[in-house]
Structures are given as C-alpha cells and as structure tokens.
Image (cartoon, rainbow, N blue to C red):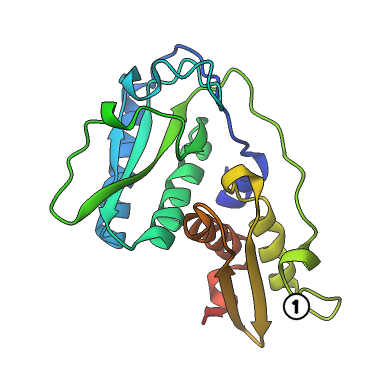
Amino acid sequence: MTELEAIEQRHSVRQFEKREIGEDIVSALQKRTDEVNAESGLHIQLFTNEPGAFLGNETSYGQFSGCCNYFAIVGPKGKDVEVGYYGQKLVLFSQTLGLNTCWVAMTYKKGNVKVDEKAGEKLYIVIALGYGKTAGVQHKNKEASAVSDLSAESPEWYKKGMEAALLAPTAMNQQKFRFTRSGNRVTAKAGIGFYTKIDLGIVKYNFEVGAGKENFTWT
C-alpha cells in the first residue's frame, strides 16, 4: 500500500479488537518512530499493550473501547504544526501495515500516559492504534473551493494535493484551514479554533503526498 492509498483508505476508528500487534509490526513501528524523531526533533513514544490511557472513558464522547496501543506525541513547546505533520506520517505508515488509528486530543486519561518528558517538553496528543472492529467511515468533507483557491486553471498536482488534504482528519471534522497558490509556491494557514495548528500539520502532510513534494515549495 502506498501512502496515497493509505490516505484514501484510512478513517478514524475508536473501537478496537482485543488483539495484540505482532512483534514484527511493533519493531517496524518503533523503527519508523525513531526515524521520525531524528528528523523532526520531537520525542514521540510508542506504547503497546498499555490500556490505561483509555480506561474509563467508554461512556464519554468518543466512546473508545479495546484500545491498548498508541503513539504519545511529545515534544518542545510551540511545535503544534510539526506534531500534526510528523504524527500523520506515522498514522499513514501504520495504515500501510494494516493497522487502524485515531487522533485523540481530549478523550483519554492524560495522567495515565507515562511518557518520558524532558525539560521544556509536553504531551500534545495521542494517536490510538490497533486493529479496528471496522475500518471506520468517511466523514463529509468541504468542497475544495471552501478551503482553497483551486480553480479550473489550477495545475493537476495542486488538484491532487487538495484532494488528499480534504481527506485529512481534523478536530471535530472542522477543516479550518486555507490553501493558496502562486505558481509552484503554496501557502497553507490554520483557522481559528482548538487544535487547528496540529490539524494544519496533518493537512500539510497529506497535501505533500497528493501533490508530490517535487512539484511545489511551501511559503
């Protein structure tokens, strides 16, 4: 499965099977986590067979069940966009391995996540991980014209980038972001709201996969 196929097939999942992730897949996840940390300067940590973060919230908003694996996204303060960007990189990699995921901002027990936090770092968010009872469902997305300057004259790479961006998960499915293009230079900005900067990072990663990094530069 390619990353673009992962974008097209991935949906948020909150109910997971009580099924362990195999050692070979855990090893692949840890290797990719280490690579992402080295590239990003973040301190993302992988937890497996650790249900504490989701215990007791089965009746709250989100209704998680059976989740005992997750990425804890830890890093220096002020790195919200990077958190979204590199977290989505791990999300899509997980999808290529046959796993399901869900970005989780509030509906987990933060005090139960025993992360290694260095000075100046904080736990931003977690990403639930495992084998979903279903593959999830696609939410209704905005039209590209509502979040970008896409037009009939736009190049094909920009169209493909926006298609991928619109498939990105965002908090409460807000899709509060805006893309504009000048030649091969693209600007992406976050709207106002909770977690919109993290959302922007997620969306930017999806856009890169769809558009092809070789076709444009960020401004």
Residue plotted at (18% across, 57% down): 120
Q: Is residue 138 above or below residue 209?
A: above
Q: In this orientation, which residue lies closer to the viewer: 28 or 19?
A: 19
Q: Residue at x 57, y 46 (%)?
A: 171
Instruction: Quadrant for residue 182, please give it.
Output: bottom right
Furthest-left residue in view? 119
Above or below, comparing residue 70 to residue 193 in the picture: above
Quadrant position of the N terminus in the picture: top right
Image height of 219 relative to 94, above or below: below
Q: How far across and down, in percent of the image, does residue 19 sit? A: 44, 13
Corner quadrant of residue 90: top left
User: In the rendered view, does 147 fall on the left or right side of 37?
Assistant: right
In depth, the one of 60 and 25 nearer the eye is 60
Percent position of residue 119, x then y: 13, 53
Camera-nearest residue between 111 and 72? 111
Q: Residue at x 41, y 15 (%)?
A: 56
Percent coordinates x, y for residue 148 in the rendering: 72, 71
Q: Which residue is mark 1?
A: 155
Residue 112 lies left or right of residue 162; in this view the side is: left
The part of the image, by quadrant, that contains residue 203 is bottom right
> How dense is the environment of label 1, judged by Cα within 10 Å: few (below 14), some, or many (20 and up)?
some
**SS class, disc 1:** loop
Q: Residue at x 52, y 60 (%)?
A: 205
Left or right of 52 on screen, residue 188 = right
> What's the residue type where badge 1 is placed?
Pro
The answer to which of 2 and 184 lies nearer the viewer is 184
Kindly give the residue lying farthest to the bottom in the view shown.
Answer: 183
| Horizontal relation, residue 53 to residue 207: left or right | left
Residue 206's place in the image compared with 219, above or below, is above
